[in-house]
Image (cartoon, rainbow, N blue to C red):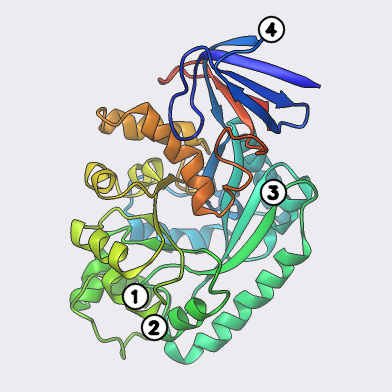
């Protein structure tokens, strides 16, 4: 059976369609046709129809920490608080929070997520089969002598996720470096050489201290490493920013999803575009405001690249898991950014970044992207998934 849908405006994942356009959709959500009109009567929605949102960066395993870490501490105190707080909850509390967070994203129109995992705890979410999931198993190890052990541990976690395949929804997994201040050069190189054809991701330049550490070996990263008991006596600063340092440790053909980018400069962006054949910039503005109280240079990034997508980070650093909320925050700070472009960031670009664009992200015949009804494009917006 076919369903015919129309609205005041339809965004196809790339652009606004001509007014009066109609979507023909199968019962299972597959797009059968996109047309300027139809002889069949169409169901009309006041507002906007868009493809399902893609949350390119989220830590579902930290969902139980909602409200547990104070706002506005800055990144280093935040990172120090998470390890000491995350295990103060029972396994049942953690599991319930993870499932609640996934269902929250579902209600908010998210059809796919790039989920960050330090452990295999969130593998159970795949059995719910609510959305497509690419799990980035986060590898941490700043001491070069322990690089192989750290990598082997991540491979074991990766194997657990591979065993929890979903049913109708697509699941993928890859190993990712956590951040430049928590991954040694040998470990970066091991990750870069493993599964070279799969996208990886990294928390990039989320705080000023990260660049200070790599340029001069000064700043608050030193206190973080001291607090964790990590020996950094052999670390020699490169004199360059973190991105321009670890980027040289990764193969240029490796697809990179750089997240946060709060302190990335125009030179950093130019370096990444020259270094990597396929690089994406993931923005998580609400988490940036929650932790650091500031945003990346959004206008500069938007002018420099079209490869921009959206993440929410975790409920430890956000009040909600909503791609639309992130877009509203960006638009509030940079009002000249059009909704035509912003909606592409939240839909097709996220699908492209996670290598799911053959299935999701745009209204094209044969795709099954999900269909979301937005009542408005402002803070009063109500999100209603029609097909998921």
Residue 185 badge: 2
- Proximity of marks 2 and 1: CB atoms separated by less than 8 Å: yes
N-terminal-most mark, 4 or 2: 4
Residue 246 badge: 1
- Residue 127, given in percent of the width and then of the height, sits at 78, 50
Name the element at disc 3.
helix
Task: For marks 3 and 2, give the one nearer the viewer.
Answer: 2
Look at 51% across and 77% down and name the residue there.
Answer: 191
N-terminal-most mark, 3 or 1: 3
Instruction: Work out how far the residue at label 4 is from the one at label 1, CA to CA, in angstroms.
Output: 56 Å
* The quadrant where residue 202 appears: bottom left
Instruction: Work out how far the residue at label 3 is from the one at label 2, CA to CA, in angstroms.
Output: 37 Å
Task: For marks 4 and 2, give the one nearer the viewer.
Answer: 4
Look at 62% across and 41% down and name the residue there.
Answer: 101
| Residue labelled with disc 3 | 93
| Residue labelled with disc 4 | 41
In the image, is residue 166 above or below residue 245? above
N-terminal-most mark, 4 or 1: 4
Whether residue 236 is visible to the viewer of this picture, yes or no, is yes
Residue 322 badge: none
Instruction: Work out how far the residue at label 3 is from the one at label 4, CA to CA, in angstroms.
Output: 48 Å
N-terminal-most mark, 3 or 4: 4
- Residue 244, given in percent of the width and then of the height, sits at 27, 71
Query: Label 3: how many residues lie within 10 Å, few (<14), some (14-19) or many (20+)?
Result: few
Instruction: Work out how far the residue at label 4 is from the one at label 2, CA to CA, in angstroms.
Output: 61 Å
């Amino acid at each position: 059976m076919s369903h015919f849908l129309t609205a005041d405006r339809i965004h196809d994942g790339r652009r606004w369609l001509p007014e009066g356009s109609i979507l023909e959709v199968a019962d299972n959500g597959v797009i059968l046709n996109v047309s300027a009109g139809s002889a069949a009567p169409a169901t009309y929605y006041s507002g906007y129809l868009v493809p399902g949102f893609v949350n390119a960066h989220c830590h579902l395993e930290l969902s139980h920490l909602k409200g547990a870490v104070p706002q506005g501490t800055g990144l280093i105190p935040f990172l120090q608080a998470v390890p000491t707080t995350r295990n103060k909850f029972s396994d049942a509390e953690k599991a319930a929070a993870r499932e609640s967070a996934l269902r929250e994203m579902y209600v908010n129109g998210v059809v796919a997520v790039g989920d960050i995992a330090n452990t295999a705890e969130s593998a159970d979410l795949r059995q719910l089969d609510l959305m497509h999931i690419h799990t980035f198993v986060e590898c941490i190890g700043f001491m070069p002598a322990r690089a192989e052990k750290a990598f082997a541990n991540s491979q074991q976690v990766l194997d657990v996720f591979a065993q929890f395949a979903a049913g109708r929804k697509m699941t993928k997994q890859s190993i990712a470096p956590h951040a430049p201040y928590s991954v040694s050069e040998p470990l970066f190189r091991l990750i870069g050489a493993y599964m070279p054809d799969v996208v990886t991701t990294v928390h990039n330049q989320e705080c000023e201290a990260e660049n200070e550490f790599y340029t001069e070996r000064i700043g608050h990263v030193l206190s973080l490493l001291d607090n964790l008991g990590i020996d950094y006596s052999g670390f020699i600063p490169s004199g360059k920013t973190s991105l321009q340092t670890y980027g040289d440790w990764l193969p240029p053909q490796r697809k990179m999803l750089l997240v946060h980018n709060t302190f990335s400069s125009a030179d950093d962006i130019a370096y990444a575009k020259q270094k990597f054949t396929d690089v994406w910039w993931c923005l998580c503005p609400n988490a940036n405001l929650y932790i650091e109280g500031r945003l990346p240079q959004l206008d500069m990034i938007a002018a420099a690249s079209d490869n921009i997508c959206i993440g929410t980070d975790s409920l430890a650093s956000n009040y909600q898991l909503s791609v639309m909320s992130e877009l509203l925050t960006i638009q509030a700070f940079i009002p000249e950014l059009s909704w035509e472009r912003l909606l592409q960031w939240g839909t097709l670009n996220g699908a492209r970044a996670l290598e799911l664009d053959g299935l999701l992200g745009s209204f094209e015949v044969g795709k099954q992207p999900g269909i979301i009804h937005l009542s408005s494009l402002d803070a009063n917006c109500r999100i209603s998934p029609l097909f998921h």
